[in-house]
Image (spheres, helix red, strand yellow):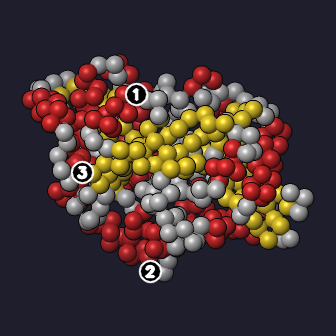
Amino acid sequence: MSDITVEPVAGKRDFDAFVDLAYRINRDDPNWVPPLRGEVVELLTPGKNPFHEHARVQLFLARRAGRVVGRISAHYDELALAQPPEQGMGPGTGNWGLFEADDEAAAHALIARAEAWLREQGMTRVLAPISLSIWEEPGLLVKGHDHPPMVMMGHNKPEYEGWIERAGYAVAKRLLTYDLPVEGRFPPLVNKIVELGEKNERIAIRRVDKRHFDRDAGIIIGILNDAWSQNWGFVPFTETEKAYAAKKLAPLIIEGVNMIAEVDGEPVAFMMSLPDVNAVIKPMGGRLFPFNWVRLLWWLRKMRPADFRVPLMGVVRKLQSSRMASQLAFMMIEHIRRHGVGVHGARRAEVGWILEDNQGMVAIAEAIGSRVNREYRIYAKPL
């Protein structure tokens, strides 16, 4: 490790090297999807990404003989520090993420430097990798390297698993995604539950209305903050983050595959589904200009064929232990399936991530005939 230096990112040249490294390290992986470079820059830039309003982030580069051989971010989130420790975050919990390395020696040098920085900030344990927020790309991919990730999901070299575990990290949580064929109908029992729900006059499943998107986005985030408030890893959205998320997601929101469920006129559940834009941006190499933006805009206007990812759903806490909670979930999934197949030619969907010990969501995923296709791990280590 003595031939490796790890230094903080300083200046534009270092910043560009930090951003560009992922494209070099992963360029030969046929299943890696190069993120749009502008999106990566925005993620890392205070004043553009509101995460930085309540977090402190330090970026590091590893070099060997002057050549960049790795990168890592070390960071902590004031909102995460304020969460109950039994929910995974809490006082003293820092993170590292955005991890890339050429080899294990570089990996261990980077991790050691990130840990040292976190100790300097008063942190006593680390959860990683998280890049940068729990709401963005949490976890290390350990299963599913044989196919590309869907929108807003990470992908990394399989070697990283061993490198991180040999640096003294133990698994804290497993996050699962489920592959779901959607061209055929769901199993008979699920269909029956949906049919009974559609006959129940108390229940209404409605589409998100893009003409009133700010209103519906507020409803969704309100349900999310209530439904997920006791989940492992939960960190609440700030008002600035709510507006930012709504603005970023608006171009990907299709009314027919985003649902709000109401009971007796009260919004009590939602299900968000996003078209898999990764299938379109994969050949772009991370660059929108000069001509890729035209291709992306054209696809966003027609979105056919388009498969979908269901990244988020929630049912208000007061209903979570009731039979109605699963019924609402099945109804929203079926409504999304009908529209996705009929209008957008969808063949498959991906549901998740789902915490492995979230028994309710795991049961729903299994009941509709989906199977685990990707596993991510969040690791922990005392500092």
Q: CA distance from mark 1 to mark 3?
A: 23 Å
Q: Amino acid at mark 1?
A: Gln
The amino acid marked with disc number 2 is Phe
Residue 250's place in the image compared with 231, above or below, is: below
> Residue at the spot x=83%, y=43% of the render?
116
Q: Give the quadrant of residue 293.
A: bottom left
Q: Residue furthest right?
A: 2
Q: Residues within 10 Å of mark 1 (few under 14, many from 20)?
A: few
Q: Residues within 10 Å of mark 3 (few under 14, many from 20)?
A: many
SS state under label 2: loop
Label 1: state its secondary structure: helix
Q: Quadrant of the C terminus?
A: top right
Location of residue 215 with respect to 137 vertically, above or below: above
Name the spot of residue 176 as percent of width and height, x first.
46, 42
**Toward the viewer: 283 or 362?**
362
Residue 111, horizontal then vertical, whole percent: 76, 48
> Distance of mark 3 from mark 2, alpha carbons?
33 Å
Nearer the observer: mark 2 or 1; the answer is 1
Q: What separation in Å lies between label 2 and label 1 (alpha carbons)?
A: 46 Å
